[in-house]
Amino acid sequence: MKNFRFGTTSLIVLLVLATLSCPTDARLPTCNPSSKIKAKKPPTGHCNIEDDDICCIKGKVYTTYKCSPPVSKKSTKAVLTLDSFEKGGDGYGPSKCDNKYHSDHTHVVALSTGWYNGGGRCLSNITINANNGISVKAMVVDECDSTMGCDEKHDYQPPCPNNLVIASQAVWRDLHVPMNEWGELDITWSDE
């Protein structure tokens, strides 16, 4: 019986073949945390807590992300939250895409930093799918910053998680989510 040895070249070829035979999903890029922020106490009178927003907690460490989970062509899992894009609402300023405020009666959303894609999805529609089988189209008008937070620019609110679609009241209403359940909802979304 002959001895069989793997040379370096043979081993590399086998590893490449094994990688190519793996399902595509196994090779998708991952989204790892990029940094951390240690919060200071917000000054009195700052941090709008409308729509169940939370303020940074002094001494708490928050994780930041420059990326979001990979986007699937058919549907990407996300968490839907509620926000007001109106002047004086908890968005604390005009929308980043068009420098305008938007009525709570229009279908508008903000996306976590990675999905916002440096403004690449600005003023485009996405389709939001609820678990009840109802879908709604909404226009991307803003970013929910996953890279920074706990400062005046971000109204002393923590950085956004990297998997959020933040929607207006109109989106929640048209998804037929009972008002007492508004706040957080597991959904999927896709580019229109």
Image (tube, helix red, strand yellow):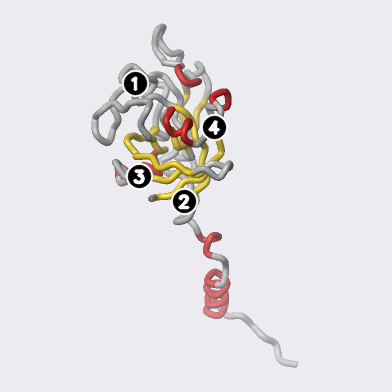
* Residue labelled with disc 2: 70
Residues under labels 4 and 3: Cα distance? 20 Å
Does label 4 or label 1 sit earlier along the sequence?
A: 1
Give percent across and percent down for residue 167.
43, 32
For mark 3, give the secondary structure: strand
Q: Quadrant of residue 14?
A: bottom right
Observer-nearest of 93 and 148 = 93
Question: Mark number for residue 125?
Answer: 3
Q: Amino acid at mark 3?
A: Asn
Crowd around label 1: few <14 · some 14–19 · many ≥20 (10 Å): some
Q: Are marks 2 and 1 in contact (CB under 8 Å)?
A: no
* Residue labelled with disc 1: 92
Above or below, 125 against 74 in this view is: above
Give percent across and percent down for residue 157.
43, 22
Q: Amino acid at mark 1?
A: Tyr
For mark 1, give the secondary structure: loop
Mark nearest the camera among 2 and 3 is 3
Give percent across and percent down for residue 75.
49, 51
- What's the residue at 52%, 71% (across, down)? 20
Residues under labels 4 and 1: Cα distance? 25 Å
Residues under labels 2 and 1: Cα distance? 28 Å
- What's the residue at 46%, 28% (across, down)? 82
**Left or right relative to 94: residue 71:** right
Does label 4 or label 3 sit earlier along the sequence?
A: 3
Above or below, 3 against 138 in this view is: below
User: In the image as oriented, which residue stretches furthest toward the left?
Assistant: 99
* Residue labelled with disc 4: 177
Q: Are marks 4 and 1 in contact (CB under 8 Å)?
A: no
Does label 2 or label 4 sit earlier along the sequence?
A: 2
